[in-house]
Image (cartoon, helix red, strand yellow):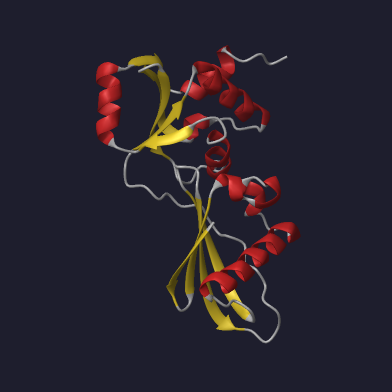
Amino acid sequence: MKFQKLSENKLKIILSNDELPNSQSFDDFVSDSSDAKHTFLEILEKAYDEVGFNTRDYKIKIDASALKNGNFVFTVTRLVKMKKNIKSAKPKKIIKEFNSNYAIYKFDNFDDFCNFCEFATKIDLYNLNNFAKKIELYLYNNNYYLSIYKINENFSNIGKFYSSITEFCRFYSSKDLFICLLKEKGKLIIKHNAIEICQNNFINHN
């Protein structure tokens, strides 16, 4: 967990997936629930202790960003001062943080990729053809690389996708140069929508 005071009224909080409190998913954490609000108030108290960012008696706005490398960024903006106790605002949206057209994840083996696809099925992560224009799986140097091209930042389950995939692999690159290397020297294992194809063909649905 990292705190960066951007200005007198703005704070950036960076959390890894492992640091989400009480084993919460990202979707749970940004939900408008009393548990989520209580948890975030505790984080703001810690921010006050570490960097002196005071939100007590202030109205605040929180913007949530899910990064492709599995981390999450919360930007807290302090607004007008309130007479009553602070009320935590619900994060309004997840925004795309990378300029590259690609997000590439590295799996150690094909089983790990299949395990992710199976988990995605269990948490109802479907219709990934709406998530990106193209999702392809490559084999290169005995590792499997999932190349995701042109992510739709308005995809309804984008937070769920980012928070779950990093349980099975790691974010590797967003550089166009590496995808060129994969295309030149790697082997294309599954083209078009690799996740959905794996869900339909390599997973036991019993």
Residue 127 versus residue 41 in the image, above or below? above
- Taking the spot 53% from the left edge, 78% from the top edge, the residue there is 79
Quick check: 183 left or right of 164?
left
Q: Position of residue 169 (x, y in %)?
A: 50, 31
Report the number of numbered marks: 0
Q: Residue furthest front?
A: 50
Q: Residue furthest bottom?
A: 83
Q: Quadrant of residue 146?
A: top left
Residue 27 versus residue 147 in the image, above or below? below
Which part of the image, by quadrant, shows the C terminus?
Answer: top right
Q: Quadrant of residue 80?
A: bottom right
Residue 66 versus residue 85 in the image, above or below? above
- Taking the spot 48% from the left edge, 46% from the top edge, the residue there is 154
Which part of the image, by quadrant, shows the N terminus?
Answer: bottom right
Residue 25 versus residue 168 in the image, above or below? below
- Taking the spot 68% from the left edge, 45% from the top edge, the residue there is 23
Quick check: 115 left or right of 190?
right
Q: Position of residue 205 (x, y in %)?
A: 68, 16
Q: Position of residue 89 (x, y in %)?
A: 62, 67
Quick check: 18 left or right of 51?
right
Q: Position of residue 4 (x, y in %)?
A: 46, 66
Quick check: 171 left or right of 63?
left
- Taking the spot 41% from the left edge, 20% from the top edge, the residue there is 143
